[in-house]
Amino acid sequence: MTVTATGAGAGKSAAATVRATVYGYPRQGPRRELKQAVEGYWQGRVSADALRRTAAELRSANWRQLADTGIDEVPTGDFSYYDHVLDTTVMVGAIPQRHRDAVAADPLDGYFAMARGTQDAAPLEMTKWFDTNYHYLVPELGPGTVFTTDSAKQVGELREALSLGHTPRPVLVGPVTYLLLAKPAPGVAAGFEPLTLLDRLLPVYAEVLADLHAAGAAWVQLDEPALVQDRTPAELNAAERAYRELGALADRPKLLVASYFDRLGEALPVLARTPVDGLALDFTGAAAAQLDDLAAVGGLPGKRLVAGVVNGRNIWVNDLEESLSTLGTLLGLAGHVDVAASCSLLHVPLDAAAEHDIDPQILRWLAFARQKTTEVVTLARGLGRGTETIAAQLAANRADLASRAASPITRVPAVRAWAAAVTDRDTHRSQPYDRRAAAQRAQLSLPLLPTTTIGSFPQTGELRTARADLRAGRIDTVTYEERIKAEIQEVISFQEKAGLDVLVHGEPERNDMVQYFAEQLSGYLATRHGWVQSYGTRYVRPPILAGDLARPAPMTVRWTTYAQSLTGRPVKGMLTGPVTMLAWSFVRDDQPLADTARQVALALRDEVNDLEAAGTSVIQVDEPALRESLPLRADARPAYLAWATEAFRLTTGGVRPDTQIHTHMCYAEFGDILPAIEDLDADVISLEAARSHMQIAGELAAAGYSREAGPGVYDIHSPRVPDVDEAAALLRKGLAALPPERLWVNPDCGLKTRGWAEVRASLENLVTAARTVRATLPTSSS
């Protein structure tokens, strides 16, 4: 393909100014230096000054790498010790009352107190950032909130980049998205809408923009991803008002409003008619329809368009010719077109070149953050100077795409035939829920308010060392397995002594709830250095689903049955569900997700059936990503929920009525999917509820949810230990919405990231709280 219109249509002088940029970059460093420094600070091993030096070195290295690749305009302000939304909360002075003294005494310690909590003050609620696996900290606002300006971080990082000779563009969470992501603070009367604070917030943004302008910012990017969702006329009017007011400021840099993850839709003409200087739009995936939307509104005459044509959320090489075609069309729809990734590169690993264990042929198909910046630069050069200047790159790209399409791992006829043979009967249990529930109660003989955990127990340094030693050959398999047996024995013994009713084996053999299974399924690739931030200092290595998938052998049966042999109480089998396996992997983009989900479900169905055959009476299939993967636009949701719930039922539909199927979800807004939760046809669901003050229990009741549920009473993402009274109070809130015969008592999530000391104390308090509340029930049975 030749993009001859690039130079001719835009004029050589205009075309030559095409810039390459990105909206954000991975923060952690090539060896997760930020994680080590932050956790070292928490543990008292790293000073505040040393932490700041590490952060500055990482920022400098990121900017240098971007500039050396050819990125013309580097982002600043996107770097964060914990979370960029929390950084925005600090910037606008919206500090919760319970944390103000800590922030006043030491801003850094107070910042981490808001993120993680203290023994005396709960942290901010945490939930998913749109439809990604990144978690942000939810702002707490109320009618009395007073915003104050603190632009020190944003100005400081801008000056750092300027001092190093870069062309920086500060990146801020936009005011409308910030308010739409916020929730009413605890104690605020029902019905309060944070967006009503917009007129109070805009002067703070005006001051931040003035400070950045004075410090040398030519452009500032304001991220408004909330506007790609379905928005009411009042919300769209608020967005227009916000950007008319900010655009009219005399003392400001040029404003670039960025959206991503989907198309802007009805918000596009709203933003286009405001006096902002440019828009940054996503043209990948579902957002590809944005090109037609842009043409329909008459384009952006006189404005800058930053075109996100390199997908910032997957790891597959870009189709350069297809992107150039899109860019060529866009040249006629804006005053100036620049090239970018579709969103921050925070959502992909840093560098595919570090993956020495992946077949070089397959490595050619992959593009992590560093490779994506090269793609952006290549496209900008081709757009600005003509495709003949990137002829070699285009030829190599065509070869890489052809290699992937022709690879035998992408299509396995036996797997495809197996998936095609699935019938509707395979996706339904043999008996309705009420009959199953009676059989399960008779089988399990559990008390009211039964206690359990979500699955994982602390992953100690000794366990991680043992896995590393096994990989390196320093210990043999027998020695490693004896270590795993000893850990399972300890976990079972503790749970019995603590008084938990349904036990788990603790998952000591698992490195990650997705990676562990991916490493045992054909069609998946594992990375060694492909770390991606999930929240705070928690990083995961999403596996890569490259081809058709099957289960060569049982994956969990051995350790589950070993744990069951140690106790007379039921031990749950623990699996990760098909939707979460996809959402927390880098999934193939060459076939519909529904087809891939069916393949995963069939592999997991075999595992579920094998667990049941081995005597496991309770099996948990976790789907924490069901809500996070919900399309951002309502019109796409029914189709997604249809295949997602079918995949879960396909996984679990083959077991006997007296086998109890659990599922688990955490840290998401569940209100939008309550009918789908019912459609899963699970017998018990456990959900996050501690940070959200048991809100989900009321939502389940209001939706008429008829099954058993365990809204969490222990927030495992904070180091604080909830006392008995706190857990009991949350449990009583749950009982105000759900009857005791349908309520379980459990933590919010798995305990992998916590230490044994806090886990022991917290679970002992949880069991005591359950017993205390159980004793007050009219039909109490212990």
Image: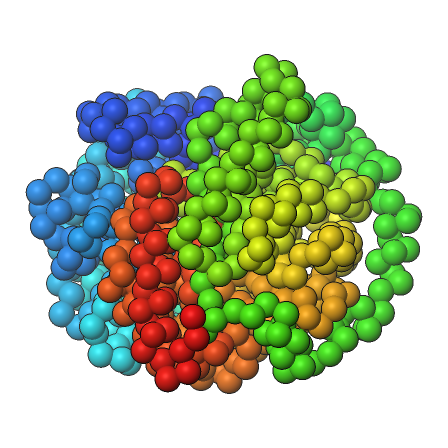
Residue furthest to the top in view is 474
Give the vertical position of 688 relative to 431 (above or below): above
Q: Is residue 349 left or right of residue 609?
A: left
Task: Decide which of 253, 443 is in the foreground and name it.
Answer: 443
Determine the residue positioned at 42% across, 50% down: 497
Is any atom of residue 55 visible in this view? no
Determine the residue positioned at 60% across, 18% down: 475
Which quadrant of the figure has residue 436?
Answer: bottom right
Determine the residue positioned at 39% across, 26% down: 33
Residue 472 x %, y %: 60, 17
For the C terminus, the image quarter is bottom left
Tally the numbered discs. Answer: 0
Determine the residue positioned at 41% across, 32% down: 28
For the N terminus, the image quarter is top right
Residue 74 x %, y %: 39, 34
Residue 337 x %, y %: 51, 46
Give the vertical position of 420 relative to 327 (above or below): below
Is any atom of residue 732 visible in this view? yes
Q: Is residue 199 left or right of residue 336?
A: left
Q: How is the image coloured?
A: rainbow
Task: Decide which of 454, 594 is in the foreground and name it.
Answer: 454
Residue 757 x %, y %: 33, 41
Task: Decide which of 167, 131 is in the foreground and name it.
Answer: 131
